[in-house]
């Protein structure tokens, strides 16, 4: 037979079972956290009409998209979860209650140039709150609490949720008469981390033809730092010069004000005037999340407030706020940095039942009893040598085995072996399940990330 | 602005939030059940190289597949989860432990003619056990236990797992000298339910040129029924005439033998000689599952034993056994038949906290406390009239609301309202959580299907 080489396309993540279990655990934590904050799960198609997905059109999107024809239909694979959400909300407007809070964890597709750590198929884990006409600032204030809860449950401690406000920035540029250049300025200022203040000032003057004093104004503003309270106090100095600025400052205060009521520690949160988010649809609060020890990774959870989710589909004003975690990339980075915990349960079973007699009925009954006790249980049914059986148990990493031979049958017990410690006990079904659960419960509670 | 009509392609299921919650519950039950039987989750790409997906080639598959080019690559969307599994096992053979047990719940794509109840994007929920070289019959015997557990947990009682064996059928045809015609005969016999015995006999004689006595042999064989023990006893009469038949009979005995040890009630299981499964790669036990009151739906969970999973990718012999649930179609049918339970929790939250004061801090703290107690909690942050707030609570179907006004703040309590009974209680945080949990725990345990 003419065989085809079994390969997976480059840019497509395909994990081995142990890593997949870790990924599943991360997804499960995100699902649970998003649900805890009362987001409802949605699942939209991967394929949409190209016309619908590209309603906004233009730019990089069009180049990267997977687009093809089937019959008469011009189809495309979704490249994010926001456009399908906009379509969904516009299409089902009458049947939804607003504010509408949804989460979606799903694969999206971008035909980018393949390179290490870049994926063409990747998971996004998004939440959005959509208002009908208006949406209270309290929704923006809640977002850091959600990020904090999600990341803490994943096992991270050393991360910082950075918050800024687009109105504050736009207002600042307006009061300095730089509104038209604001996009260019933001793009230049974005390089502060990389090239430093002196170089940025020079770029502002040389490339954007700003007079040096104005460039200094910008750099002074961006340099405002300190505790959240200190930053807000220094920002108060600018109050009264521009309405948009004042509104942005009020919003920033509102977002920081209730942090402790939301249970977010100050150390995991900071106002940061240098972040802006590239996308031009953000209009208020913007968020980025940085792993403190890995700033080079960039933001691992970003988003912001927008005023008009579905303008390409409906004339209804649907403001919202949302964040997105690029889950596949995050997982890849955690793998690379060896931050995935080995304590997480990655075996396919909690206990492997190994029959040692010809008659399988007692082993089957034991496995059925383990499952009735809620344990993930595998019956090793192959007729192989004892050594092969035990080597299989090692290979799949089962935390426990149950041996069932003539002796055990005669005594009416199971020989249960803790594979990690080597300890063996002869126990009845319920005792066995209880003993196994001690370890399994501990392992199941392990966070998937270990800093 | 030129607006695009927000539409979802026909043949693509997109659910409203309440139905989506029911679907999620079904998926969660399948994930848990598959895990309980020690299947490890896998997640393979939706897109594969066309060459890889179509290695087997030919037939309907090629016509229905979504295939397209991107750059120089000839790509296709997976049309089932079996081919990607074959690729995965062949590609990662050295890193896997055999028997390898995996489950995958994922979307697959078939560009079929659109019609009611037919989907172009649909979920399959598959399990497979793959052996290396050989695989014990006990694995085939375990499958009915998995189907039984999954369906019972979904809430179904009136279903029948039907089992047959391809070796038994092939052996029977061989002993009657009908081996070449066996495919045609099986296809004709498959119509027994629809057109009846007389018509089938006529077709066997007229269309397949069988002599009447042989046609009667076939019909007599297919008519064997009774309890499992009775059927097996009648099959014993054919023993000794064909080796393949005898082997099939032994396998069928082995599969039925341990049902009670596996916890499968006899009423949910039957040997049925008329089922064969169309696919030619099945070589041993075959399974179908019928909803007793809805036979017209056809099988909702099918599969079987095969001898060579990955022959198009590797020369290793990888026998296996697997089943698949067409989840999207099953969900659609359950919806149509009004079999989805309304008792399942479909609200986005367990409790909606409604602040009645200007200062939101106490409401935020109350919501944080509810979440700390594990309850899915939403803070209603919009500044609207009381009536609007309560109508929102009704619309999202939250089982509880918490009202927090000046009185409550003064007394240090929350007013908690059970939205179903109308009962209101003034409680402290922990008491409130405990009271809410009583209802939530009950609702969360509800099965998604109600017969």
Image (tube, coloured by chain):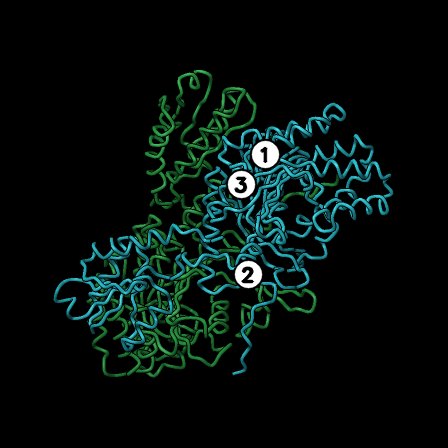
Chain colours: A green, B cyan
Local secondary structure at mark 1: helix
Distance CA(mark 3)–CA(mark 1): 15 Å
Q: Which circle marks residue B336 in the picture?
A: 2
Residue B402 to residue B142: above or below: below
Distance CA(mark 3)–CA(mark 2): 31 Å
A157 vs B144, left or right, is: left
- In the foreground, B328 or A75: B328
Chain letter of the residue beneath label 3 in the structure image: B
Quadrant for residue B364, please give it. Answer: bottom left
Distance CA(mark 2)–CA(mark 1): 33 Å
- Which residue is disc 1 drawn over? B140
- In the foreground, B265 or B361: B265
B445 vs A2, left or right, is: left
- Which residue is disc 3 drawn over? B102
Closer to the N terminus: mark 3 or mark 1?
Answer: 3
Q: Nearer the viewer, mark 2 or mark 1?
A: 2
Measuring 44% from the left and 54% from the top, which residue is drawn there? Answer: A327
Local secondary structure at mark 3: strand
Chain letter of the residue beneath label 1 in the structure image: B
- Residues tagged 3 and 1 counted as in contact (Cβ below 8 A): no
Local secondary structure at mark 2: helix
- View extreme (left): residue: B410
Residue A373 to residue A86: above or below: above
Does the image show residue A328? no
Closer to the N terminus: mark 2 or mark 1?
Answer: 1
- Residues tagged 2 and 1 counted as in contact (Cβ below 8 A): no
Q: Nearer the viewer, mark 3 or mark 1?
A: 1
In the rendered image, residue A154, in percent from the top left (x then y), is placed at 35, 49
- In the foreground, B286 or A316: B286
Residue B48 to residue B178: above or below: below
Does the image show residue B176? yes
């Amino acid at each position: 037979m003419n065989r085809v080489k079994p390969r997976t396309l480059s840019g497509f993540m395909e994990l081995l079972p142990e890593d997949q279990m870790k990924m599943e655990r991360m997804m499960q934590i995100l699902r649970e956290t998003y649900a805890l904050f009362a987001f409802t799960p949605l699942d939209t198609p991967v394929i949409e009409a190209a016309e619908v997905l590209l309603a906004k059109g233009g730019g990089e999107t069009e180049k990267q998209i997977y687009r093809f024809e089937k019959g008469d239909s011009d189809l495309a694979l979704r490249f994010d979860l926001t456009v399908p959400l906009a379509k969904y909300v516009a299409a089902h407007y009458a049947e939804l209650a607003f504010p509408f809070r949804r989460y979606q964890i799903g694969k999206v597709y971008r035909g980018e140039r393949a390179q290490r750590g870049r994926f063409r198929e990747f998971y996004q884990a998004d939440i959005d709150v959509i208002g009908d006409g208006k949406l209270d600032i309290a929704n923006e204030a809640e977002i850091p609490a959600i990020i904090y809860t999600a990341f803490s449950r994943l096992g991270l401690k050393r991360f910082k949720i950075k918050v800024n406000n687009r109105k504050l920035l736009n207002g600042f540029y307006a009061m300095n008469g730089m509104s038209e250049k604001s996009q260019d300025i933001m793009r230049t200022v974005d390089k502060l981390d990389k090239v430093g203040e002196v170089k940025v000032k020079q770029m502002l003057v040389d490339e954007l033809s700003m007079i040096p004093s104005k460039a200094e104004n910008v750099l002074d503003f961006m340099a405002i730092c300190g505790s959240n309270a200190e930053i807000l106090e220094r920002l108060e100095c600018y109050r009264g010069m521009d309405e948009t600025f004042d509104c942005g400052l009020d919003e920033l205060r509102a977002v920081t004000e209730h942090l402790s009521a939301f249970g977010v520690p100050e150390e995991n949160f900071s106002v940061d005037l240098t972040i802006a988010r590239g996308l031009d649809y953000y209009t208020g609060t913007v968020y980025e999340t940085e792993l403190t020890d890995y700033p080079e990774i960039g933001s691992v959870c970003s988003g912001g407030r927008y005023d008009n989710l579905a303008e390409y589909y409906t004339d209804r004003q649907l403001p919202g706020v949302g964040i997105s975690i690029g889950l596949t990339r995050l997982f890849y980075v955690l793998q690379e940095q060896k931050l995935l915990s080995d304590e997480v349960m990655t075996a396919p079973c909690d206990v492997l039942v190994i029959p040692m007699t010809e008659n399988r009925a007692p082993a089957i009954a034991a496995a059925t009893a383990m499952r009735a006790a809620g344990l993930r249980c595998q019956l090793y049914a192959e007729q192989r040598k004892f050594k092969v059986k035990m080597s299989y148990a090692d290979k799949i990493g089962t935390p426990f085995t149950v041996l069932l031979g003539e002796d055990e049958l005669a005594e009416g017990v199971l020989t249960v072996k803790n594979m990690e410690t080597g300890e063996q006990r002869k126990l009845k079904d319920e005792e066995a399940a209880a003993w196994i659960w001690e370890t399994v419960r501990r392992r199941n509670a392990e966070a998937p990330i270990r800093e």
